[in-house]
């Protein structure tokens, strides 16, 4: 005869095995820690995903599998759990795996013994990395759209102002031709041709800006910086020779940048020709180029410095990258170079900063997104 208590024990064991099988094979991360935060249990899915051996890690601090920057967040969540033991607490933590980290969302709950005293912390989590990446992409898209809207407003103002000015001038000349004699009309027609030519140049420049700002899928290639600069210098070697120019490379020949070749060439060409235009009459032109990586490893920074006449940034800081803005009275200046440079580097999700000492030097810090 089978003892009923033995039968009950067997049923309890079968139930335990059944539920343990569910937990062990669940696609959620399930871990228990003791009240000090040391691993007491981890299901196989968690151990396999994070490539850890339960036999080694049971009894070890669970914080060791959380990035140091998230330690306090985890501690604060557990503290809140003990302050409100009847409630679960939710937290998003980053978990390192190989050469990256995953975003994981966790529900922390207290487990109690038969005397209703806290026994362990139950942690059930799942991977939300894909959702976080999508959120970041959406946030980046919103930021880019916001920046494009600001540029569009500025661009609309520029188009309205510049085209209207040319049209008003042309209309004025046409009205005068109806009143003046034949000899004066010849002069007026020459003025009209000049105005129409200026309008055409303005439209061409605006089209170039539109082309830059409408590019969304720019090809990215590896560019060796010194080689690219030397190629640009060769294409304008007469200008460089006449300006008695020397280049100082604070970088190695193998230093490179990954960006769009056409934009990179245009940016450097504009910077170099600006340096030639605004060289000091008191000394030979010297241009120095250096490269570095920003502290957060997001940007490669190219620093371009010349010893030219400089710019009065106290006076012109807000206008520096404006369209048709000139600052040193150079008759050859059109006020497009810096505007186009900024448009191109922003199209590459980078940024540009300027530093200058009037009469001494100008430095441009170009940050290219890696």
Image (cartoon, grey):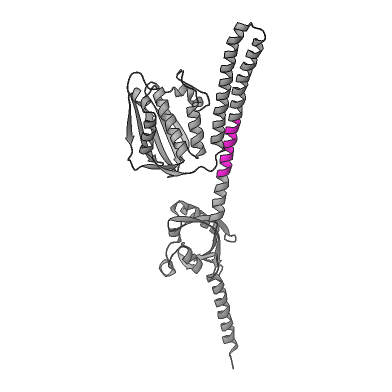
Residue nearest the observer in this picture, 26 or 63:
26
Main secondary-structure element of the magenta-colored stretch: helix
The front one of 355 and 19 is 355
Q: Where is 340 relative to 294, above or below?
A: above
On whether residue 73 falls in the magenta region, the answer is no
The x and y percentages for residue 79 are: 52, 56
Residue 33 visible, this orientation: no
> Quarter of the image holding residue 225?
top left
Residue 281: x and y, percent? 35, 18
Which stretch appears magenta? Answer: 140-154
* Vertical order, 359 against 116 (above or below): above
Q: Is residue 61 left or right of residue 169?
A: left
Q: Is residue 49 visible?
A: yes
Q: Nearer the viewer, residue 196 or 330?
A: 196
Please state the horizontal and vertical placement of residue 75, each as a whole percent of the image.
49, 55
What residue lies at 59% left-to-right and 39% top-to-bottom? 145
Check the picture and name the quadrant holding the C terminus.
Answer: top left
Above or below, 251 relative to 118: above
Residue 151 inside the magenta-drawn segment: yes
Q: Position of residue 205 (x, y in %)?
A: 54, 28
């Amino acid at each position: 005869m089978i003892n009923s208590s033995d039968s009950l024990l067997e049923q309890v064991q079968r139930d335990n095995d059944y539920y343990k099988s569910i937990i062990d094979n669940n696609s959620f991360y399930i871990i228990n820690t003791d009240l000090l935060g040391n691993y007491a249990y981890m299901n196989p899915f968690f151990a396999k995903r994070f490539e850890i051996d339960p036999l080694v890690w049971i009894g070890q601090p669970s914080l060791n599998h959380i990035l140091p920057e998230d330690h306090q967040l985890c501690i604060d969540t557990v503290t809140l759990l003990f302050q409100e033991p009847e409630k679960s607490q939710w937290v998003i933590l980053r978990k390192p795996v190989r050469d990256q980290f995953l975003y994981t969302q966790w529900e922390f709950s207290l487990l109690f013994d038969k005397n209703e005293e806290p026994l362990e912390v139950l942690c059930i989590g799942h991977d939300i990395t894909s959702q976080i990446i999508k959120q970041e992409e959406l946030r980046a898209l919103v930021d880019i759209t916001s920046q494009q809207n600001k540029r569009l407003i500025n661009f609309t103002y520029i188009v309205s102002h510049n085209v209207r000015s040319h049209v008003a001038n042309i209309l004025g000349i046409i009205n005068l031709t109806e009143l003046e004699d034949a000899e004066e009309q010849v002069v007026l027609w020459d003025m009209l041709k000049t105005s129409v030519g200026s309008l055409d140049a303005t439209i061409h420049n605006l089209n170039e800006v539109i082309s830059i700002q409408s590019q969304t899928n720019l090809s990215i290639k590896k560019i060796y910086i010194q080689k690219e600069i030397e190629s640009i210098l060769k294409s304008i070697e007469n200008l460089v020779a006449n300006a008695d120019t020397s280049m100082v490379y604070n970088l190695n020949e193998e230093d490179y940048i990954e960006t769009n070749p056409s934009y990179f060439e245009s940016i450097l060409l504009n910077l170099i020709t600006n340096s030639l235009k605004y060289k000091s009459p008191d000394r030979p032109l010297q241009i120095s180029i250096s490269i570095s990586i920003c502290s957060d490893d997001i940007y490669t920074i190219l620093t371009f410095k010349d010893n030219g006449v400089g710019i009065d940034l106290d006076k012109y800081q807000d206008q520096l990258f404006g369209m048709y803005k000139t600052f040193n009275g150079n008759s050859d200046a059109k006020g497009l170079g810096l505007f186009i440079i900024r448009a191109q580097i922003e199209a590459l999700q980078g940024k540009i900063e300027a530093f200058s000492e009037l009469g001494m030097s100008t430095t441009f810090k170009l940050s290219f997104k890696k």
